Amino acid sequence: MSEEFIPRTIPRVKVALYGPTNVGKTLFRNVLLRKDTSPPKPTEMTQEEEVMREYKKPTEFGTTMSIEKYKLTLVDVPGRPEFKQMRIETLKKIVGWLFMYDATDPSSAERLMEMIKTELEPERKLKSAIAMMVVGTKKDLGPNDEAVKKGGEIAEYLSKHTTMLYGYSVPHVVISCTDAGNVTLTFLCIEAINFDLRPPKEIISRIMEGKAPPTVPSVAVEAPKEVRPPEKPIPTEPSIEEIQVEKMEVPEAPEPKEPVLEEPLGGLEEVGGKEEVLPEVPSPVEVMREVAPEKPKIEEVAPKPTKPKVVPKEVKAKPIRIELGTDEKAWNLARKIKEKIPMLSGCYFISWGKDTVHVALDSEKKLTEKNKEFVRAILSLYNAIRGRFDVNVILLGGEEKGYGITIGDKIIVMEFDPKDISDMMMMFSAFRYKKPTMPIGEAISPKPVKFVLNKTDKLWDAARSIKNTSADIISCYIVIPENGGYAVAHDSDEYLAKEQEEFLSTILNIMNYADKITKTKLLMLVGKQSIIVAKKKGYIVIKTKGRPPTHMLRMISAAK
């Protein structure tokens, strides 16, 4: 079980040095990797360098905290016009982009903008992009004001992509590639954006002020790889959707079987003693018969029996009318959202009045019964969440379709291909929290669920290992279907409190409603606290503070 959820390889991150010729891309690479810093010859072949790096995040106490080790592939492409096809063919699955221009030459910035519009955008090369920076070079030679202004316009142009997907504006800095401090800080900036989805203001300020960077540990560098135009395919690297996570230190079981999932665990019925074997609750009529079997008059004397409070019953949402929306702005917004986010295959815009839900789509003005059932399923899912978790973003990763749902004074539902789940997780996790307003319909209570403690030590160790990967993780549970109930392991002591059972019951209820929308393999709820649920034969449930940590999103999306 645990091996199916815990990825085994280290994350890989590809960063491209992109721009016209003679801007200092190769010098930047050599200085960053502490190689020969003499002026290099113009690059005529794509060069790739692979190094191991460790991303460290500054703390409020002036120290740093290790967040994640990863393998960096630094891609340096030739900038001359005749190498356009080579650039297009070799720039694949790039996560981070350093867009570089000569800050002493306005035509260099113009050429960079032209390359972005004529090379990258038509080929959709920015689809996998998470981190972007615009970097003017040759600061030591005296920047040209017009060139720097044009560089700022490039950053503003690229920000249309990042603000919609990740909520940040692309930084623009001017550096000298001969200054190791400038180079190191610039790369620390792109690294921070990639892992935290926000530009580090302090690092950018230090670049602009020209302050020296902190000492950077040396790294082992492999020999550069020459990448020729692919007569045969370049060795495949995992895409952003396939980024893997380093093996966790989880004790190996004596035998490589999966007894937890494939076979019942013997002796589970003994766990927890009497609390595990619950007697059937007698009906009020049976109770009355036992009390007075020969005196039916007891009905005249005894008070009418109250309904026993055994377990909460499911409360179904009130029937609602679903109609075609008449607000033209809603239709235009649904179409615009689909147009602006290339990964989307559909968009619903849902609003509500007193007793009616109004729906606008990105397509023709027609509302089928299938559309109505889909909207009802969305509202039922939210009503299962409402009142229990304070969230305004829901992400469902299914086998055939995925859905991102934002909830405020309106509900927006975005449909996407499951292969884009990693990109969508990053995008939706970056949404800023906004208190959602209540839609019509009743909150839905969870059905009763029986839980026992799992006896497999390996799963308890796995839950603790996952929790220890980040200080932002509040709790981690591994939940396995077992004999009509669920066997639970978690990150704390081997005990399951009532509050924990209620939490897990709610999660399983939510997953049932999610399955009515799509056969859900991944659920993410984002709000003041966030919850990630990965499902295969069992469930991993992770609760985090605020927005889920980026490395945790990568770990979950990598767990196929």
Image (cartoon, rainbow, N blue to C red):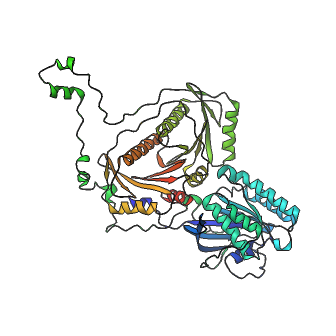
- Residue 85 drawn at (x, y percent): 74, 64
Closer-to-camera residue (15/318):
318
Residue at the image position 59 percent from the left and 59 percent from the top:
240
Residue sitting farthest toward the left? 294
| Left or right relative to 223: residue 24 | right
Indicate the quadrant containing the N terminus: top left, top right, bottom left or bottom right: bottom left
* Residue 46 visible in the snapshot: no
Quarter of the image holding residue 159? bottom right
Percent of width and height locating residue 341: 66, 47
Q: Is 310 placed above or below 497 here?
A: above
Left or right: 81 with respect to 90? right
- Closer to the camera, 336 or 499? 499
Dividing the picture into quarters, in which one does residue 322 lie? top right
Q: Position of residue 330 (x, y in %)?
A: 67, 34
Q: Residue furthest front?
A: 61
> Could you tell me how many numbered marks the image carries?
0
Left or right: residue 61 versus residue 31 is: left
Q: Picture coordinates of residue 209 (x, y %)? A: 77, 68
Using the image, determine if residue 427 lies above or below residue 284: below
Above or below for 31 versus 293? below
> Is residue 448 in view?
yes
